[in-house]
Image (spheres, helix red, strand yellow):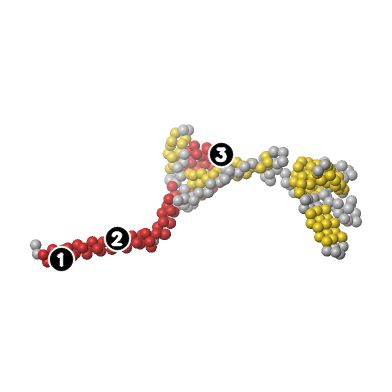
């Protein structure tokens, strides 16, 4: 073979290998350097799913241990409309059967109480959707009944909730106010009342006595008719004193525990047993 031909072929081979290596290096730099962030984010989005794990919520008790609010298991039933077909496999009486999807919708409606039209709208209005709510906040029993159907395109999202055994506002929302105002006629005009769940009950004029019981400072509040009988035991002091010569202000705002009874004219009563509250005593001289 002609040496010149051999040299030419060798040169072409070397050049071809060089071009391939350069192309490989350029592609490698593009993937590893130029587009590294974009490709990493794309990979993470395909294999990483952000899931919110609901925390377990404990019970709320009053001073006597009575449950005011409790945590309960609730679930949101969701579906992927894109995966819904005209027929769906469903477990019926322990047997796996292929049934019309509308039969599944009717079964879900019966279990959850959601109208058939509402479920149908969620499943069929947007056939390409990957997420739609079927029912929200269902109980554990409903969730288990739906799970037993074995519907492939349905999913469950935990959604813990609160329950209030004594009403939707955690029992009784109560408050009261007792004053002995520095007015011309404190017996006729005062701010004394208590309210429960938005309903107010007026109270008569009261008088305050402050003293000590051993190491405790106790304020006693009573009226002449026996409808108000309350003791306030000081736990923490909150005094503010100001003396500017011509003006002297002495303010006390202690915090403590309240025990006793308040009664309305028609017999409605409010029992207090260790309720935490605040008292005030204000003296202004000028």
First of labels 1, 2 by sequence position: 1
Q: Which residue is mark 2?
A: 24
Q: Quadrant of the C terminus?
A: bottom right
Q: Which residue is mark 3?
A: 140
Name the front one of labels 3 and 1: 1
How would you rate the neighbour count of disc 3 (Cα within 10 Å): few for under 14, some for 14-19, many for 20 or more? some
Q: Quadrant of the N terminus?
A: bottom left
Label 1, label 2: how far apart the Cα atoms are: 24 Å
Label 3, label 1: how far apart the Cα atoms are: 81 Å
Q: Which residue is mark 1?
A: 8
- Residues 165 and 123: in front is 165
How would you rate the neighbour count of disc 1 (Cα within 10 Å): few for under 14, some for 14-19, many for 20 or more? few
The reply to whether residue 270 is visible in this rendering is no
Tell which residue pokes out farthest to the right in this image: 184
Q: Residue at x 50, y 49 (%)?
A: 51
Q: Residue at x 58, y 43 (%)?
A: 56
Q: Position of residue 66 (x, y in %)?
A: 69, 38
Q: Is residue 232 left or right of residue 63?
A: right
State yes or no: discs 1 and 2 in contact (Cβ < 8 Å): no
State yes or no: discs 3 and 2 in contact (Cβ < 8 Å): no
Tell which residue pokes out farthest to the top in this image: 94
């Amino acid at each position: 073979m002609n040496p010149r031909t051999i040299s030419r072929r060798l040169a072409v081979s070397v050049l071809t290998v060089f071009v391939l290596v350069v192309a490989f290096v350029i592609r490698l730099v593009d993937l590893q350097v130029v587009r590294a962030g974009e490709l990493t984010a794309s990979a993470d989005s395909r294999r990483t799913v952000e899931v919110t794990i609901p925390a377990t919520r404990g019970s709320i008790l009053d001073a006597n241990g009575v449950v005011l609010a409790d945590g309960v298991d609730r679930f949101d039933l969701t579906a992927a409309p894109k995966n819904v077909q005209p027929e769906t496999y469903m477990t019926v009486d322990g047997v796996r059967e292929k049934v019309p999807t509308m039969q599944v919708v009717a079964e879900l409606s019966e279990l959850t109480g959601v109208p058939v039209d509402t479920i149908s709208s969620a499943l069929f209005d947007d056939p390409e959707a990957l997420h739609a709510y079927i029912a929200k906040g269902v109980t554990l029993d409903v969730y288990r009944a739906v799970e037993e159907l074995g519907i492939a395109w349905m999913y469950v999202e935990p959604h813990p909730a609160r329950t209030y055994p004594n009403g939707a506002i955690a029992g009784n929302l109560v408050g009261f106010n007792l004053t002995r105002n520095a007015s011309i006629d404190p017996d006729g005009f005062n701010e004394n009342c208590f309210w429960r769940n938005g309903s107010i009950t007026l109270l008569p004029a009261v008088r305050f006595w402050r003293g000590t019981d051993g190491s405790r400072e106790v304020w006693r509040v009573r009226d002449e008719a026996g409808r108000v009988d309350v003791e306030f035991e000081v736990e923490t002091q909150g005094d503010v004193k100001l003396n500017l010569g011509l003006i002297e202000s002495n303010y006390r705002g202690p915090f403590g525990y309240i025990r006793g009874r308040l009664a309305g004219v028609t017999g409605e009563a409010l029992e207090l047993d260790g309720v935490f509250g605040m008292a005030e005593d204000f003296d202004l001289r000028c």
